[in-house]
Image: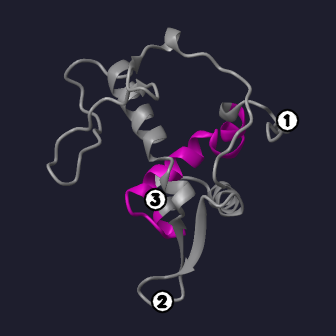
Amino acid sequence: MKRKSLEGNTCAVARSLDVIGDWWSLLIIRDALGGIRRFSEFQRNLGLAKNILSTRLKGMVDQGIMTVEAASDGSAYREYVLTEKGKALMPVLAALSQWGREHMFEPGEMGSVLLDVKNRRPLRKIELISEDGRALQPEDVVLSARVIHAAK
């Protein structure tokens, strides 16, 4: 069954999911944020079929989330490098990681934790903060259709 495109949807969540909404794409981005750059490294780390990995990487390049560059070591390989648009997904992955740690693990169970590189301490929990600095709860937020003035 072919997936329906959400490209023209007025909801930013829907449009985002249209581009990065499958788990492989998010795991590829996670690995790229962790320093993986080569097709073979993504494939080995994820255990993902080559055709699926190729399709996901091509889609991310087409969407401007990654670029393809010559290998940094001068070899004939190509490397997939996150663009600023791709790096901007870090808070999304951090929020998913924090949610997963809180809701998907038993107490005392081993799991991954995002750490601040400088002090090797876990990140502070991501919060919803209003423009005036107030901490918001889900019931304090409403989705509204507006003209978007975001940089591309």
Residue extending furthest toward the top: 139
Question: Is 56 situated above or below 99?
Answer: below
Q: Which residue is mark 2?
A: 75
Q: Quadrant of residue 80?
A: bottom right
Q: Position of residue 105 (x, y in %)?
A: 32, 22
Q: Find numbered disc 3 in the image and state the secondary structure of the residue it sits on.
A: helix
Q: Which residue is mark 3?
A: 32
Mark 2 residue crowding within 10 angstroms, few (<14) / some (14–19) / many (20+): few
Q: Residue visible at 65% across and 32% down?
A: 13
Q: Which residue is mark 1?
A: 1
Q: Which residues are magenta?
A: 14-41
The reply, left or right, for residue 74 in relation to residue 121 is: right
Question: Is 142 situated above or below 30?
Answer: above
Q: Nearer the viewer, mark 3 or mark 1?
A: 3
Residue 100 belongs to magenta span:
no
Q: Nearer the viewer, mark 2 or mark 1?
A: 2
Amino acid on which disc 1 is placed: Met
Is the C terminus in the top left, top right, bottom left or bottom right quadrant? bottom right
User: Mark 3–mark 2 contact, CB under 8 Å?
Assistant: no
Q: Find numbered disc 2 in the image and state the secondary structure of the residue it sits on.
A: loop
Cα distance, mark 2 to mark 1?
40 Å
Q: Residue visible at 26% across and 38% down?
A: 123
